[in-house]
Image (spheres, coloured by chain):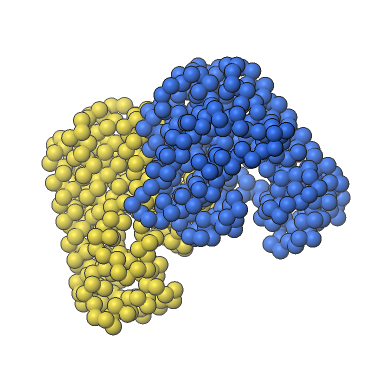
Chain colours: A blue, B yellow
Amino acid sequence: MAVVASLSNQTPSQPGIQSLVDLVSKGMEDVNQIILSKAGSNVELIPEIARHLISSGGKRLRPMLTLACANMFGYRGDGHVVLAASVEFMHTATLLHDDVVDESDMRRGKLAARKLWGNQASVLVGDYLLGQAFKMMVDVGSLEALRVLSEASAIIAEGEVLQLGAAKNIKTSEAEYLRVIEAKTAALFAAAAEVGPIIAGQDEAMRAAARTYGMELGLAFQLVDDALDYGGSSADLGKDIGDDFREGKITLPVVFSIQRGTDQEVAFWQRCLEGDDVTDADLQEAIALMKKYDAIADTVERAKSYGANAIKALDRLPAGSHRDALAEAVAFCIARVS
Amino acid sequence: MAVVASLSNQTPSQPGIQSLVDLVSKGMEDVNQIILSKAGSNVELIPEIARHLISSGGKRLRPMLTLACANMFGYRGDGHVVLAASVEFMHTATLLHDDVVDESDMRRGKLAARKLWGNQASVLVGDYLLGQAFKMMVDVGSLEALRVLSEASAIIAEGEVLQLGAAKNIKTSEAEYLRVIEAKTAALFAAAAEVGPIIAGQDEAMRAAARTYGMELGLAFQLVDDALDYGGSSADLGKDIGDDFREGKITLPVVFSIQRGTDQEVAFWQRCLEGDDVTDADLQEAIALMKKYDAIADTVERAKSYGANAIKALDRLPAGSHRDALAEAVAFCIARVS
């Protein structure tokens, strides 16, 4: 699929996820087919919105984790592809609701669904995809996989509520922020990985290793995203930066900048994050402050340390091409910001 | 609990649901305890909002259906109370999202959660309750119950999307409207009833009878609600009427009035339902047109006929006090409008 193919545009020197993509390519074709068919409904608006989101890409990293973490145990059934599709539906439902909650205008470089069809449809189609996700999990028939994914579903929502409380609150601590991203992002990565060994009939030790890998990768992934939203380590600022800043989101680079800032700088952050009207000059000033205090570099350092934990968790999983590809995926996530 | 006790304020001559309430009172105490404990979270806003909704009452008809439809088969475990609590969580999540979608200001005579805490929190706490509902179902461990309830979850969302498309569309037909309420209301009644025989280990024949009972009762219930929103059959118009009208919702009394109206009257409906600014005089005019064309009376007739189907479905279920109480519950739902 185009979505997957677009990932191959890496320069050879960079760590890529091409080996992961190649290893699970057959399974991902099935996942994509299931996604398209299960996003269908006689109610026209539903497939229209679902396909808008699904075709707009994204890396599909979460379902690839599920496939790789099942295949690494030699799993031969087709439950993993259905679980992988469920994971992607849960993720898509979250994106739809997130955009409503964050009042976002754009998603993956396209107009957000809520701008095209309204908040109402975004809420309801998200609910529909979540219902479909659970139906698909039931079809697979593993109560343990259902337990892990339903638990993740509740935790993600908790994380989003937590973030809502933290939004625009300049007193948010690093620990509070980590709690938010562990819930809203890393929990689904962890569940996506853990259902691999579950469907492959593995014991708790293997499940725990996969879960830890997913959780740590998810944390690294989110922190890299946070750094990228302020241009990452690069001096070359693309045009897709500053969304978090404009939405008043407190992310780790901001937490660091506020902790290390003078009273006057804290007042600047307060005005920008609590107010509605921030300018491009404000964004430039924010990035300058981050550079002054190494806030982005330190965020990337944190991401690298979670990435290292993810790699360490892999030691407990079976050696082989899948494990190698999962290790490369960690490097890929980190390399996005270097 | 106060919620349940308030239902006993019936005059003795009216059909009541007191026998249903009495029969399942022990189980409903457990359901209420589960609801309060599972609506808890370390994230403060979640129990605050959940308890606001839960303590504001409602009849808890759906979980009572689950308990009665399990007890009538002599079920002795405690899976039915957990499933009943899941059903109520699904319902509560739907109410939270509905209020956002409908932009409602009031819910059960109190300010809607979205007016108190904002749309964002309502969306996310709804998601949390849905996640908790699925976790609880997994705890019960019946894949069949999970299948029925996850199916209902997707269907409810489909119904809401369908309603969104039909909203303010004066060409909505009776069949289209029935499709909406079958999905958005009756499907959960049907699932709530069906999981009773499922958890009690009954066969498909019993499941089908319970499902049909719930479905037909749900249709009757919704049509009575629709009629009550225009004051029902009574000449005495309370103050809690006209919400559907102000929100531009096309319900069956409106469908009938439009079908039977003159061009001028249809233009009136169009102005009121498609516009944002309707007056009390408009509402009085709408009610007058409904009386002119027996639109409310005919809606109540339809409700009675679905109620009769519900009673008929009970014939296939075991005779006894539970079946009698379920029959009375149908009469109670209809009697609300008489």
- In the image, taking residue A263 as reference, residue A320 lies left or right, namely left
- Return the x and y of residue B297 as percentages of the image width and height: 19, 67
- Classify residue B280 as left or right of residue B191: right
Which quadrant is the C terminus of chain A positioned in?
top right
In-front residue for pair B288/A28 = A28
Considering only vertical position in the picture, is B240 above or below A170? Answer: below
Is residue B105 visible in the rendered image? The answer is yes
- Name the residue located 22 percent from the left edge and 36 percent from the top edge: B207
**Picture layout, residue A14 above or below residue A266:** above
Q: Where does residue B59 sit, x and y in percent of width and height?
A: 33, 50
Nearest to the observer: residue A219 or residue A270: A219
Whether residue B140 is visible, yes or no, is no
Residue at (38% x, 38% y) in the render: A135
- Residue A26 lies, with reference to residue B300, above or below; the image says above
Residue nearest the observer in this picture, A88 or B315: A88
Q: Residue at x 50, y 23 (%)?
A: A71
Residue B163 or residue B95, whichever sits in front: B163
Quadrant assignment, res B172: bottom left
Left or right: where A156 falls relative to A273: left
Going 57% across and 36% down the picture, which residue do you hit? A61
| In-image side of A205 versus B298 (left or right) | right
**Number of marks in the rendered image:** 0
What is the x, y in percent for residue A163? 63, 46
